[in-house]
Amino acid sequence: MPKDERSQRKRIVLLLWILVAIFYFYISYDYVRITMSDRQFSDYLQHVVQIAGTERRPAQEIRALILVKAEQLGLPVRGDQIYISGGGDSLNVAVNYDADIEIPILQRQIIPKHFEHKAKYEGPR
């Protein structure tokens, strides 16, 4: 095999490896972004439950606050995925949703990731 063909093959192989690395970078970026947003959402959910339990807020208001925060964070949470039971000292909130890990260039779903959160009012100690 002539030297020119070998160097051309090496360039093609290098280009393919670069494309694979870019592909994995995009998937990793989307995964990390969604995971970090979910962590912020979880912290906010616990905070809202503590305040709503103390102030005895209605379920509609709690649901609205949760939906607004999910929208701010870019999370695909719908109202029917938020389960609120009890009130005041016995307030319990559960949120279950799926987020899709996508390839930003192609906008295609690669990996669906399921998130579940449960928050319970904990009175003052």
Image: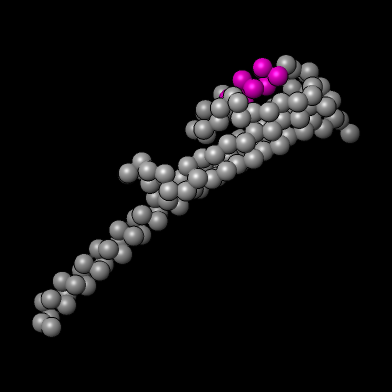
Asked whether, in this view, residue 50 is left or right of residue 98, the answer is right
Task: Quadrant for residue 102, please give it.
Answer: top left
Specify the quadrant that holds the N terminus: bottom left
Q: Which span is picked out in magenta?
A: 59-67
Asked whether, in this view, residue 95 is left or right of residue 15, the answer is right
Please provide percent x and percent y for residue 9: 19, 72
Q: Residue at x 73, y 34 (%)?
A: 119
Q: Is residue 109 above or below residue 41?
A: below
Q: How is the image coloured?
A: one colour
Could you tell me what secondary structure mostly forms the magenta stretch? helix
Question: Total marks drawn?
Answer: 0
Question: Which residue is farthest front?
Answer: 80
User: Could you say which is closer to the camera, residue 28 or residue 94?
Assistant: 94
Specify the quadrant that holds the C terminus: top right
Q: Is residue 95 above or below residue 19?
A: above
Task: Quadrant for residue 79, please give it.
Answer: top right
Please provide percent x and percent y for residue 4: 11, 77
Question: Which residue is farthest right?
Answer: 125
User: Could you say which is closer to the camera, residue 62 or residue 37?
Assistant: 62
Does residue 51 appear in this view? no
108 part of magenta stretch: no
Q: Residue at x 71, y 37 (%)?
A: 118
Does residue 106 appear in this view? yes
Task: Quadrant for residue 18, please give it.
Answer: bottom left
Please provide percent x and percent y for residue 103: 38, 46
Please provide percent x and percent y for residue 15: 25, 63
